[in-house]
Image (spheres, rainbow, N blue to C red):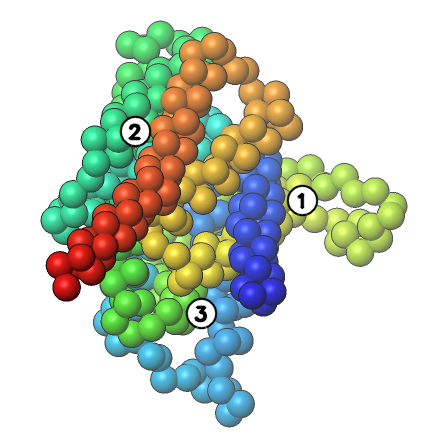
């Protein structure tokens, strides 16, 4: 029991500590060079693939034979690459980090859509919470355009493009989550293999984008040197440009974040993962707003409240009320069977 609790705390610590810190470093990068999404994605993939490779290497320095067919890992890697590319590409359309977080909380909707395509049925409260969440996303998006001093009409091209990109990423992410869950159910919860192959097999896909990557690296290299206190002599002696330093920190925190998410995916259902990540996004949203002084209008607060409130309602209905109803029904059926005998 103690080991289970400790493992759960470790998973939660990786998700909240790693992912929330990752948002801080991402915000720093975006403020320096908004069009750096591709380089951020590549850096994260390289760091994670290197770190995860140690769990897949034998004492003879060869790769272990995968427990899951390689074609499945390749398919997951392709989807994972596409989701990350789409999410980071959205920053090029003038969407702020807090609103990016809110829009990515659309996960409950896409998880429900993926489940519906598999024939799953949902309660009226689940559907209602998704409708409320959708409304909250739209309110937040329009508030973001207004906070930047634009009319909705004037910013409609950028706003619509950013929304469509994030929506596509969320739909694909939901399908990928269901596919990974099915893979684990068939072959076992080999989350370390998933962590390695989803990143390693994606690396060749960056080759056609080498020109863009060089341009983005040059822009971050031209940033002022990172200001480091004397109490951190190792960092101080490195003399790293601030953009490159935050890029490295972003990759390290992303490694912690994605490790926690993979651990959770191996231990819980897709819906539970979605709810935990929505709570994490709320913490990241608040932190980003406080630390970077984003303007929060009443409309923005209302939109965020609708999104996270709907996510909580969906989680309560899915993780508590419906299981309790099923449990009561089973108990009632058992009593009826006992009387019939």
- Image quadrant where residue 228 sits: top right
Which residue sits at x=16%, y=43%? 121
| Residue highlighted by disc 1 | 241
Question: In terms of secondary structure, where does tag 3 sit?
Answer: helix
Q: Is residue 67 above or below residue 323?
A: below
In this orientation, which residue lies closer to the viewer: 66 or 128? 128
Q: Foreground mark, 2 or 3?
A: 2
Q: Quadrant of the N terminus?
A: bottom right
Q: Foreground mark, 3 or 1?
A: 3
Distance between mark 2 and mark 3 Cα atoms? 34 Å
| Residue highlighted by disc 2 | 129
Mark 3 or mark 1: whose residue is earlier in sequence: 3
| Residue highlighted by disc 3 | 192
Mark 1 or mark 2: whose residue is earlier in sequence: 2
Q: Is residue 172 above or below residue 154?
A: below
Q: Foreground mark, 1 or 2?
A: 2
Q: Where does residue 299 sit, x and y in percent of width and height?
A: 43, 11
Q: Is residue 206 above or below residue 16?
A: below
Question: In terms of secondary structure, where does tag 1 sit?
Answer: loop
């Amino acid at each position: 029991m103690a080991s289970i609790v400790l493992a759960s705390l470790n998973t939660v610590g990786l998700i909240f500590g790693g992912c929330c810190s990752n948002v801080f470093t991402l915000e720093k990068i975006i403020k320096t060079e908004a069009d750096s999404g591709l380089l951020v994605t590549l850096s994260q993939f390289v760091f994670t693939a290197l770190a995860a490779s140690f769990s897949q290497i034998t004492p003879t320095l060869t790769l272990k034979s995968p427990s899951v067919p390689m074609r499945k890992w390749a398919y997951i890697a392709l989807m994972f690459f596409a989701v990350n590319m789409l999410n980071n590409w959205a920053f090029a359309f003038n969407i702020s980090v807090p609103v990016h977080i809110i829009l990515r909380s659309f996960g409950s909707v896409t998880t429900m859509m993926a489940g519906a395509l598999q024939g799953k049925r949902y309660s009226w409260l689940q559907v209602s919470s998704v409708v409320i969440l959708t409304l909250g996303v739209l309110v937040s998006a329009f508030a973001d355009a207004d906070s930047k001093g634009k009319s909705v009409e004037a910013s409609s091209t950028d706003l619509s493009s950013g929304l469509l990109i994030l929506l596509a990423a969320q739909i694909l992410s939901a399908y990928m989550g269901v596919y990974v869950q099915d893979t684990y159910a068939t072959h076992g919860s080999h989350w370390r293999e998933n962590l390695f192959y989803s990143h390693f097999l994606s690396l060749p896909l960056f080759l056609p984008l080498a020109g863009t990557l060089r341009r983005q690296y040059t822009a971050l290299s031209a940033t002022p040197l990172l200001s480091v206190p004397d109490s951190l002599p190792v960092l101080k002696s490195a003399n790293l440009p601030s953009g490159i330093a935050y890029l490295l920190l972003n990759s390290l925190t992303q490694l912690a974040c994605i490790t926690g998410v993979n651990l959770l995916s191996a231990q819980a259902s897709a819906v539970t993962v979605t709810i935990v990540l929505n709570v994490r996004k709320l913490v990241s949203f608040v932190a980003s707003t406080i630390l970077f002084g984003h303007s929060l209008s009443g409309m923005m607060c209302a939109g965020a409240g609708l999104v996270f409130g709907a996510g909580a309602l969906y989680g309560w209905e899915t993780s508590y009320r419906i299981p309790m109803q099923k449990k009561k029904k089973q108990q009632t059926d058992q009593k009826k069977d006992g009387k019939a005998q």
